[in-house]
Image (cartoon, helix red, strand yellow):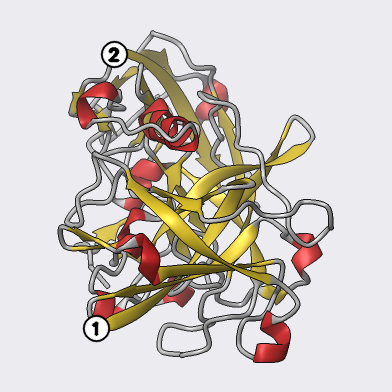
Amino acid sequence: MRRLVALPLALLACAVAAGPAAAAENRATPRIVNGTTIASTEAPWTVAIQIEQGSGVGSCSGTILDATHVLTAAHCVVDGSSVAPASGILLAAGTPDITTKAAQAQGRVVGVKTVRVHPGYRSSEIPDDVAVLTLEAPLDFSGPTIQPLPMVPTGTYVFSGTTTRVFGFGITATNRDDFGILRRLSTETVPASLCGTDAPGALLCTFRRGRAACSGDSGGTATAVVKGQRVLIGVTDIAASECSAGLNLYANVAAPEIRGFIDAAVQEQNVSADQLPVSPRGGTRVRINTTRPRVGRTVTCMRGSWSGSGSLSYRFQFQFTKSGRSTRATSLSRKKTYRLKSRDRGWKVGCVVRATNVGGSGAGVSATFRTVRSR
């Protein structure tokens, strides 16, 4: 697997240190660690994918979008600058187990006619890690074991703290070799900037120690309930080098940077990178401008470095941990200053900068929260 430099995360009790696999001969891609085995009817949209490229065979997961299109991760089908031939890709739908012939017989194995990769994807980088597979024959949705999953509406922001269910066929620990059983886990979204990415509008991040996607879950299904409906919010991309650390990154399907490609691919259209908007980049250097905040003083949220940021809005967040963890926050606004009040005494203050443009919306969070003192 590719690895990122480990970064200290203020709100997470871990560090980022990994990336998706690239080599076809040893494509270890994220799987479910400490997940629950489930029936196909609980996730009829998640499929197992096997890719033959060069001298190797890789294993991934994917999500059914409609009868002839499956969404997966670009790094599942790209080795360096080479895209796997469609003839070397098979997917299994409608079965929770592809490890035996009897189990495989419960579902349907389908070949692939066309492979489309996001034109902005680079194997040395994290964003835009999505691909759409056009199937040789349509899937049958007449039964409960094979069904499509709707995507979250374009531009819908998934807030930090959202409960997320992740589905995939991946391995159950970093060094295991047990790909092929469908599992799910529950985790929670956190600000993407805290997970070491400078593309917080194009990526989602989840963290729950001891529970995460791991190798083989790449391209799999991250979901949340939005307006009463379970929808696809992300495509599994990155796992920590030790999967049990509990951290994952996903391509954010609500971001126009990602969604523009997916929508075009489902319409059997090719798009160039120039035709797709790019979401804001940056957000990793947001900070409060003082080391000793005091009641009555004004603190300023320093925006950090952004490119293509469009409009910026600010929010001040407070944490209190002495008698159980409590949090609260001001509303997002264009105002980047806040006058500390008596009720803030003893709380730790930090801030969020949200950047929005036509490519998406992402937030940067201050890495350090400072304790508010008396006057």
The image quadrant that residue 182 belongs to is bottom right
The foreground one among 308 and 159 is: 308
Name the amino acid, label 1. Ser
Residue 56 screen position, x and y as percent: 29, 82
Q: Which residue is mark 1?
A: 55
Query: Badges 1 and 2: C-beta atoms under 8 Å apart?
Result: no
Q: Residue at x 31, y 65 (%)?
A: 20
> Residue 30: percent from the left, percent from the top?
44, 69
Circle 2 crowding by C-alpha within 10 Å: few under 14, some 14–19, many from 20: some
Q: Which residue is mark 2?
A: 310
- Please name the residue shown 57% across and 47% down the image: 68
Name the kind of residue labelled 2 in the image. Gly
- Is there any visible trace of residue 60 in the rendered image? yes
Query: Vertically, is 357 above or below 214?
Result: above
Determine whether, in the image, residue 78 is placed left or right of residue 250.
left
Q: Nearer the viewer, residue 318 or 51?
A: 51
